Amino acid sequence: MDLFKLSCAVPLEYLIIRKTVLRFVEEKKLSVNDKKFLYPLEAFDKSELSLTDKIGPDDQIRYFLSERVFRKVAELARKIADNRVFEIELDVKCAGFPLISSFIQSLFRMGVKVHLVTLGTDEGPGELTESEIQLVKEIIKGNRGDLSVIEPATHKIINAGDIFSADHLLEHSIQSFDQFAEKNAGLIGVIKNCINSPLEAEYYYNLSKKNGDALKTVKANYTLSMLFLRHHAVNNRNLSKGRALLDEAYEIIQNGDLAYTGTDTENFYRVFNRNGYGLILFREGRSEEAIELLRWGINKLSDEYSIHYMHRSVIMYNICLCYKRLHRYDEAIEEFKKLLDIDYAFPEYHLEMGFCLKEKGDYEGYVSCIRNALSVSPLHSDSHYLMSLTLLEDENYVLAESHAKTAWEVAGDDITAYNYAYILSLNNKYELLDSLLPSLQSDSLPEWLILQAEKRAQVSSVEAKEYLLACREIFPKHELINENILALSE
């Protein structure tokens, strides 16, 4: 039976990527983070991972958003490119899947040509693990499949970071099993939000409240509040709605409706709710009150459970951000040091501490923090981007270009694209400029157009001026466009 081909019909996107990566990269050269993503159903030593990444499915409170998943896929593409692979073949039927599409775009940014072909169905030995074989067989059975196999596998895939394959599995279960959506609405909502479908997430969060279960309502209200505070489109966010949802859930907890879950669980959700309320205080500029509330939460959490330990680190991070907002950088740095003592392998913590050091005038400390972030995550795009900026300030354009390139290859977003284009222009390189076009909504679009004019100025100043005059019709008040026109008129 062609189980790999059948897995592509689900699709299990991580599996398609794994098969492609292993054609060019030895398994022993994969990092622990790589293995967690590519082998989500397998057990192995994860002690090297950050606290966030090593947490198991049952205790997970942080989830991969699509941007982070796309960057993970880009890191895997980079491993192929680093092996001097210049072209590969992928099955055309897989090209439209979101994660595979991102993988293809990443390979393109790294100079690897992707030929879309109709591949044969021959399987090599060991392409699917025993757990994956069991999962695919149960999926094929449709409504006769065994949910006791499919559900835990879905949770493990979510935990590993492939939210898109998880979404495919959840949709399969919704269609195949009666009442699946109602029973799992909270989790479905989380994944819909992760894949940038917050309106669908809102539907499922509300669905999870319909049976009146107190715990489900408390959890749903928290996730709904985060939609209105963070994840909805800007014009759909609403601080008042977020506050009302958190307050409604807090009243349920304070009335003792979660007492049946036990003291530790009740306390966890009480603290979880107030951590959300801390965000409201932060947004309102009441950071001192937020710090007091967050410290209360830390003291309420138990030392016995990993989910409490994980949440403690989240709250500590939020305290750091509050101190940073208050410009109390010494206190923020001390908190970051405590946080790094328990989760050194999380690169974002290093960068945030670095920003505080920079604000204090400790530029060397700032650069050291970027280096530390890269030491725990060598392809961390934000770190490469920031390193390119520091090298740019030092006028080390060659090394700045190298870091800017890596940042763009991994992230592929507007910020890293323009940064790379700008640094290339300083080195008189314009060949990639068209490939570095930002989105039409990007703030850097006018600056990118100026680089296009610079490119034309290498041949003709008249042509460059005509180009800028056309740009001014669209951006009449843009200062740099007008300055460049004036310079070319002298």
Image (tube, rainbow, N blue to C red):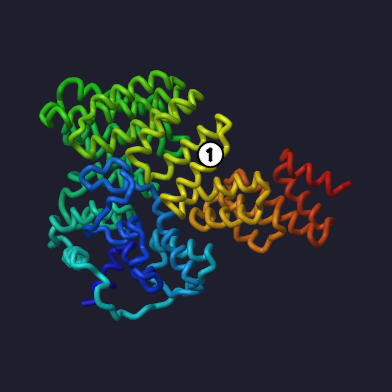
Picture coordinates of residue 117, whole percent (x, y): 43, 77
Judge left or right: residue 29 versus residue 364: left
- Nearest the viewer among 88 and 322 is 322
In the image, residue 198 above or below residue 294: below
Residue at the limit of the structure toward the left, as seen here: 260
The disc labelled 1 sits on which kind of residue?
Tyr
The quarter of the picture where residue 74 lies is: bottom left
Judge left or right: residue 321 versus residue 355: left
What residue sits 74% from the left and 54% below the top? 453
In the image, residue 47 above or below residue 343: below
In the image, residue 29 above or below residue 256: below
What residue sits 13% from the left and 32% below the top? 261
What residue sits 39% from the left and 78% below the top? 118
Picture coordinates of residue 289, whole percent (x, y): 38, 18
Figure quadrant of the N terminus: bottom left
- Nearest the viewer among 319 and 167 is 319
Q: How many numbered marks are there? A: 1
Q: Secondary structure at mark 1?
A: helix
What residue sits 39% from the left and 70% below the top? 25
Judge left or right: residue 51 versus residue 407: left
The residue pinned by badge 1 equals: 366
- Nearest the viewer among 112 and 105 is 112
In the image, residue 139 above or below residue 468: below
Picture coordinates of residue 172, whole percent (x, y): 24, 58
Picture coordinates of residue 16, whole percent (x, y): 34, 67
Neighbours of disc 1 within 10 Å: few (<14), some (14-19), many (20+): many
